[in-house]
Image (cartoon, rainbow, N blue to C red):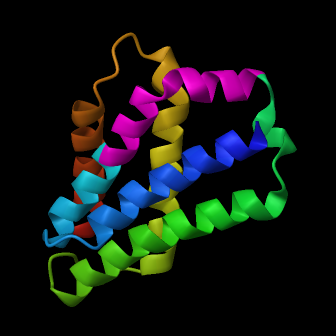
């Protein structure tokens, strides 16, 4: 089951990489990345809930968890760095902002089961607007 969890995480990273490497502008990339993550979790919620109930995440080796989070954070940082370079975003501490954004994305996913209706596109747009408020102020 640990293998299944690792494969789910790899599929998330594949979607994130596709957005990061795409032609869109940084502002749009950030929104698309968040939306792709939320859509993936929404589409695979049954698997994530099953793995959670089976306590699979606690059985994963710590280095695998750290590797996943580090890769996610780096892809977010790449978009932020591109945005700063293109003057789409103000000059920010990219690494700290990416860390904060990654935690906010995961936090939204964690409360997702508590919401009566989870619309990945709507939730992504709301979270992206909060990020834009920070990046463009």
Task: Residue 115: tell me if it is visible.
Answer: yes
Residue at 72%, 46% (x, y): give it. Answer: 3
Tell whether position 40 is magenta.
yes
Residue at 31%, 55% (x, y): give it. Answer: 33
Q: Which of these two is toward me, 6 or 20?
A: 6
Give x and y (percent) for residue 63.
79, 65
Q: Is residue 80 above or below residue 47?
A: below
Q: Is residue 117 above or below residue 72?
A: above
Task: Residue 137: tell me if it is visible.
Answer: no
Quarter-of-image position of residue 132 = bottom left
Secondary structure character of the magenta stretch overall: helix
Q: Which of these two is toward me, 94 or 77?
A: 77
Give x and y (percent) for residue 126.
25, 39
The residue positioned farthest toward the top in the image shown: 116
Q: Quadrant of the C terminus?
A: bottom left
Q: Is residue 51 left or right of residue 44?
A: right
Q: Is residue 8 left or right of residue 118?
A: right
Q: Which of these two is toward me, 52 or 128?
A: 52
Residue at 41%, 28% (x, y): give it. Answer: 42
Q: Is residue 80 left or right of residue 103?
A: left
Q: Which residues are magenta?
A: 36-53
Tally of numbered tags: 0
Q: Quadrant of the N terminus?
A: top right
Give x and y (percent) for residue 135.
26, 68
Q: Is residue 96 left or right of residue 131?
A: right
Q: Is residue 97 above or below residue 131?
A: below
Give x and y (percent) for residue 98.
46, 68
Tell whether position 111 is magenta.
no
Residue at 31%, 73% (x, y): give it. Answer: 79
């Amino acid at each position: 089951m640990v293998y299944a969890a690792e494969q789910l995480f790899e599929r998330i990273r594949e979607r994130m990489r596709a957005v990061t490497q795409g032609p869109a502008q940084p502002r749009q990339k950030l929104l698309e990345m968040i939306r792709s993550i939320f859509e993936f979790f929404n589409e695979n919620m049954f698997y994530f809930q099953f793995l959670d109930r089976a306590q699979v995440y606690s059985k994963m080796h710590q280095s695998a968890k750290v590797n996943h989070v580090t890769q996610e954070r780096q892809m977010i940082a790449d978009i932020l760095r591109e945005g700063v370079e293109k003057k789409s975003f103000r000059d920010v501490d990219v690494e700290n902002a990416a860390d904060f954004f990654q935690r906010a994305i995961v936090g939204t996913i964690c409360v997702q089961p508590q919401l009566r209706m989870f619309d990945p596109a709507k939730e992504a747009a709301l979270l992206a607007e909060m990020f834009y408020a920070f990046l463009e102020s």
